[in-house]
Amino acid sequence: MCTIEAAIASSVLGTLVSGGGAVYQGRMAQQNANYQAQLANYNAKVSENNAIMQTQAADADADTIDRRRKVALAQGQVSFAKSGVVINEGTTLDVLGGMAAEFELDRLNRLHQGEVQSRANMIGAQQDRSNAGGLLAQGNAAMTAGLISGAGTLAAGGGQIAMSMPSAKKPGLSSIPQQSSYSQYYPF
């Protein structure tokens, strides 16, 4: 009798460990997915900050280009004035206007470049946030699967333990008497 009790206790313990292991596995998968989601959200924030910095850098570069334009135009006017050319008419005006247009084009190109880089970083941030949401959903699904698996293991193990107990009635065999009852009716 002691071996039957030990076997039943071992089955109960094994069932509990298996069920608990399934739940633990689901929880660990959920924690890992939550950590990965935190990293994705962090990366999204970094991308957003990079987008802001790209815009600010483009603005600063555009201001530098604008200052260089003003200096170059002033130097050009001084150079023309030294040579005795009238500054605000004819060829002189065309040359200074062309210089100003080139600087303005450089300034606008730099602003556009900053905007493109900023938008690319914002798109990356949106992708990271979307990824984080998917990871959280995966983690929740893993935890649910772990709970269901653990509950299933416990239920199946409990059924097997109940069926293995000596006093348990086996399904479909309830009308057949136990061995000791046979000997009363059939003496062979």
Image: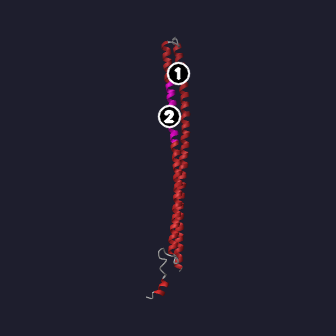
What amino acid is labelled 1 in the image? Ala
What amino acid is labelled 2 in the image? Val
Mark 2 Cα-neighbour bin, 10 Å: few <14, some 14–19, many ≥20: some
Q: Residue furthest left?
A: 188
Q: Tell me the element at label 1.
A: helix
Magenta-drawn segment: 103-125
Tell me where residue 53 sits by quadrant: top right
- Please check the rendered image and state whether residue 52 is part of the magenta-colored stretch, yes or no: no
The x, y position of residue 22, in whole percent, is 52, 62
Q: Residue at x 53, y 23 (%)?
A: 69
The answer to whether residue 32 of the structure is visible from this angle is no
Is most of the magenta stretch helix, strand or loop?
A: helix
Q: Which mark is residue 72?
A: 1
* Left or right of 60 in this view: 182: left
The x, y position of residue 89, in whole percent, is 51, 12
User: How many discs mark residues in the rendered view?
Assistant: 2
Give the residue number, with chain letter if any, for mark 2.
116
Mark 1 Cα-neighbour bin, 10 Å: few <14, some 14–19, many ≥20: some
The x, y position of residue 1, in whole percent, is 53, 80
Question: Marks 1/2: CA distance?
Answer: 28 Å
Quarter in which the C terminus is drawn: bottom left
The answer to whether residue 5 of the structure is visible from this angle is yes
Is 85 drawn above or below residue 33 in the view shown?
Answer: above
- Please check the rendered image and state whether residue 104 is part of the magenta-colored stretch, yes or no: yes
Q: Residue at x 48, y 17 (%)?
A: 95
Q: Tell me the element at label 2.
A: helix
Q: Which residue is nearer to you in this view: 16 or 167?
A: 167
